[in-house]
Image: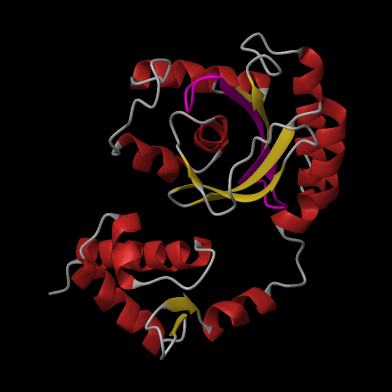
């Protein structure tokens, strides 16, 4: 008899592999994939074989490294008539950077986390940004808190089963404290994480919804704490929320 739980676990691992390959900036090998996913090379290789057979991934015959395959490209083309988050946020990100003088980061909410899509750094000498493809912490990043506050319940359930890292002395490390923070986020509509990912840095993020009302992404401003202090300037949060609403509107979201 088939173990449904085992099947679901295998499916999750296969999707994790596809997402990791998609997030890589260039073709990626088995060893690097295994390190990124925290899995054995044998486990990753078994999933890679199946995904290559089904054309969701392709393997370079010369280097033995992997990239997205034709099936992923066909799926993307099939939905090309819909506006994607990257293009929907492009003009808004430029406006928000000019309005606030801060770096702007647009991220996608996925089944198991938040992944950076684009970064638009400030024009100053000190550049603050997050590299596209980076995965952001669910519990200690402003973007992750938006995903937990407005995303699917399954994401919250997944986060509760993860081991948290204390990246700084300011990182929230208890669910009671995080739950209280998430309640604030739902009321005010934005999230922050002052010096929780790195000392001297802060970020403020807002939710982006699609035409079905699902939280599919976040838009955030990022800066040093002397430019983006713990006591948030209302003008910054107002601009951020306007930006998030504009991106949501571009995706077809209509508030209830």
Query: Which residue appears at 69% of the width and 31% of the height?
Result: 126
Front residue of 227 and 205: 227
Residue 256 shows in this picture = no
Q: Is residue 5 left or right of residue 254?
A: left
Q: Quadrant of the C terminus?
A: top right
Where is residue 229? Give x, y as percent.
Answer: 65, 13
Determine which quarter of the picture holds residue 46.
Answer: bottom left
Q: Nearer the viewer, residue 38 or 110?
A: 38
- The relative height of residue 46 versus residue 131 in the rendered view (above or below) is below
What span is colored magenta in the figure?
194-219
Q: Residue at x 61, y 12 (%)?
A: 230
Seen in the picture, residue 111 relative to 195 is either above or below; the reply is below
**Does residue 234 show up magenta in the picture?**
no
Residue 246 shows in this picture? yes
Q: Could you tell me residue 171's position as x and y percent?
A: 41, 20
Residue at the image point whose x is 64% and y is 22% from the top: 224
Horizontal placement of 68 versus 251: left or right? left
Report the front residue among 176 and 97.
97
Residue located farthest toward the left when viewing the structure as drawn? 1
The residue lying at 43 percent from left, 15 percent from top is 170
Q: Judge whether residue 213 is colored magenta.
A: yes
Horizontally, residue 102 falls left or right of residue 165, namely right
**Above or below for 175 versus 13:** above
Tally the marks: 0
Q: Position of residue 190 (x, y in %)?
A: 65, 25
- Most extreme residue toward the front is 125
Question: Which x, y percent locates residue 106?
Answer: 67, 45
- Against 1, is 155 above or below? above
């Amino acid at each position: 008899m088939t173990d449904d739980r085992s099947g679901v676990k295998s499916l999750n691992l296969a999707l994790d592999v596809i997402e990791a390959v998609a997030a890589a900036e260039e073709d990626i090998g088995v060893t690097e994939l295994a390190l990124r996913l925290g899995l054995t090379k044998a486990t990753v290789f078994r999933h890679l074989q199946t995904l290559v057979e089904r054309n969701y991934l392709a393997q370079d015959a010369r280097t033995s490294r992997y990239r997205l395959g034709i099936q992923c490209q066909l799926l993307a083309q099939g939905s090309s008539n819909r506006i994607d988050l990257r293009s929907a946020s492009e003009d808004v990100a430029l406006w928000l950077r000019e309005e606030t003088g801060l770096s702007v980061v647009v991220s996608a909410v996925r089944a198991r986390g938040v992944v950076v899509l684009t970064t638009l750094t400030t024009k100053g000498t000190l550049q603050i940004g997050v590299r596209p493809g980076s995965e952001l912490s669910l519990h200690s990043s402003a973007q992750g808190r938006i995903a937990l506050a407005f995303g699917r319940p399954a994401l919250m359930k997944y986060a509760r089963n993860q081991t948290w890292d204390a990246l700084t002395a300011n990182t929230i490390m208890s669910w009671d404290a995080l739950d209280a923070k998430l309640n604030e986020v739902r009321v005010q509509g934005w999230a922050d994480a002052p010096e929780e990912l790195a000392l001297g840095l802060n970020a403020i993020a807002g939710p982006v919804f699609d035409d079905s009302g699902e939280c599919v992404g976040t838009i955030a401003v990022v800066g040093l704490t002397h430019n983006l202090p713990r006591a948030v300037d209302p003008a910054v949060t107002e601009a951020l929320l306007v930006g998030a609403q504009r991106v949501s509107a571009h995706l077809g979201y209509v508030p209830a």
